[in-house]
Image (cartoon, rainbow, N blue to C red):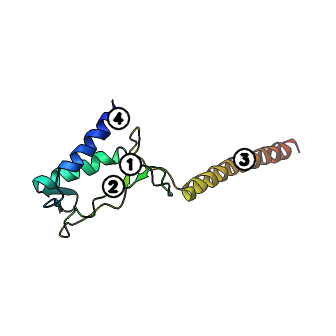
């Protein structure tokens, strides 16, 4: 893949595709489980360009290390049922989100608690076995 050539093509398309009349509408359908996208011709072109620019956008450097900025503010219609909260670029694509620091801490504590519980079980079992043997020998 020639990244430089692709970036040049995106820049060229960005110059020639007009912003005027570019509009995208997102509508929730199917009980809110699906979405429908309707757009003007230039809306589709500008939306596609915004997505392609995302391939080259720098990472935001915030809490989410995969987050990038994709500018759709002037493109999405005010009548849309939803907008986008954030955009991420993840290579290779992994559908499972990265756990937060708090979640990693909880997972670690749960692991140690499970280990301590197993250790306590073994110790108590040995004490019980020793008591049973001692009682039988009397």
Left or right of 122? Residue 65 is: left
The answer to the question of whether label 1 and label 2 lie on touching residues, with beta carbons closer than 8 A, is: yes
Image mark for residue 119? 3
Image mark for residue 70? 2
> Label 4 neighbourhood size at 10 Å, few (<14), some (14-19), many (20+)?
few
| Residue bearing the label numbered 4 | 3
| Secondary element at tag 1 | loop
Q: Nearer the viewer, residue 108 or 5?
A: 5
Left or right of 57? Residue 135 is: right
| Residue bearing the label numbered 1 | 57
Callout in the foreground (3, 1): 1
Image mark for residue 68? none
Reply above or below: 114 against 84: above
Q: Nearer the viewer, residue 63 or 97?
A: 63
The answer to the question of whether label 4 and label 2 lie on touching residues, with beta carbons closer than 8 A, is: no
Disc nearer the start of the sequence (4/1): 4
Reply above or below: 21 against 59: below
Q: Nearer the viewer, residue 34 or 132?
A: 34
**x, y percentage for residue 95?**
38, 45
């Amino acid at each position: 893949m020639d990244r430089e050539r692709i970036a040049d093509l995106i820049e060229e398309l960005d110059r020639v595709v007009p912003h005027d009349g570019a509009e995208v509408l997102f509508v929730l359908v199917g009980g809110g489980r699906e979405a429908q996208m309707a757009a003007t011709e230039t809306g589709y072109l500008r939306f596609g360009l915004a997505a392609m620019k995302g391939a080259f956008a720098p990472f935001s450097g915030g809490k989410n290390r995969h987050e990038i900025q994709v500018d759709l503010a002037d493109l999405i219609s005010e009548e849309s049922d939803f907008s986008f909260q954030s955009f991420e670029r993840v290579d290779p694509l992994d559908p499972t989100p990265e756990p937060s620091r708090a979640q990693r801490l909880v997972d670690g504590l749960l692991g140690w608690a499970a280990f301590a519980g197993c250790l306590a079980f073994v110790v108590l079992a040995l004490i019980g076995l020793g008591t049973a043997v001692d009682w039988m020998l009397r």
